[in-house]
Amino acid sequence: MTSHAALGAVRAGVAILKGTGIRINCISPGQIDVGISLSTSPTTTTQGPTSQLPPADLQSIEVQKQNIGLERAGTPSEVARVAGFLASGFSSYVTGANLVVDGGAS
């Protein structure tokens, strides 16, 4: 599913779930370093729009510093914290939102 399709599903879900007390949100992660090296894979390609960043191990530290506001790739735990926030009562008035977790790259 493309990111625009996911956002459309979230927005449509808000209307459908209205009055049920169920909240629906979207997390849009940026470049996340998952600790798996893709540089040795013979089938490694960068698919999608040209503005999409490649996996962290395929991008030099210098390029990360140019493209990402925090000058580094994110970690899975940083995205998980956002998911935890959305699952908690602290986000009780948040629905239909797209939380961008990209370190300032967008």
Image (spheres, grey):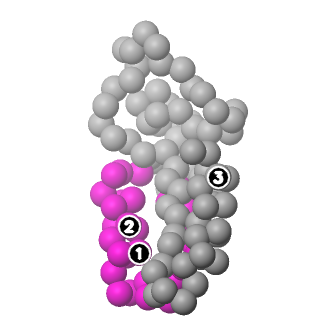
Q: Nearer the viewer, mark 1 or mark 3?
A: 3
Q: Give the residue at x 58% y 84%.
A: 18
- Distance in Å between CA atoms under marks 1 and 3: 20 Å
Rendered view: 7 above or below 2: below
| Residue bearing the label numbered 2 | 83
* The label number, if any, that marks residue 86 in the structure image: 1
Residue 37 seen in the current view: yes
Rendered view: 41 above or below 54: above
Whether the residues at callouts 1 and 2 have beta carbons within 8 Å, the answer is: yes
Q: Residue furthest top?
A: 42
Mark 3 crowdedness (10 Å alpha carbons): few <14, some 14-19, many ≥20: few
| Residue bearing the label numbered 3 | 5
Residue 67 seen in the current view: no
Seen from the viewer's position, the closer of residues 70 and 25 is 25
**What is the three-letter code of the residue carrying label 3?**
Ala
In this picture, which residue range is highlighted in magenta? 74-103
**What is the three-letter code of the residue carrying label 1?**
Leu
Q: Give the residue at x 57% y 38%.
A: 53
Q: Position of residue 72 (x, y in %)?
A: 45, 47
Q: Is residue 37 magenta?
A: no
Q: Earlier in the sequence, mark 1 or mark 3?
A: 3
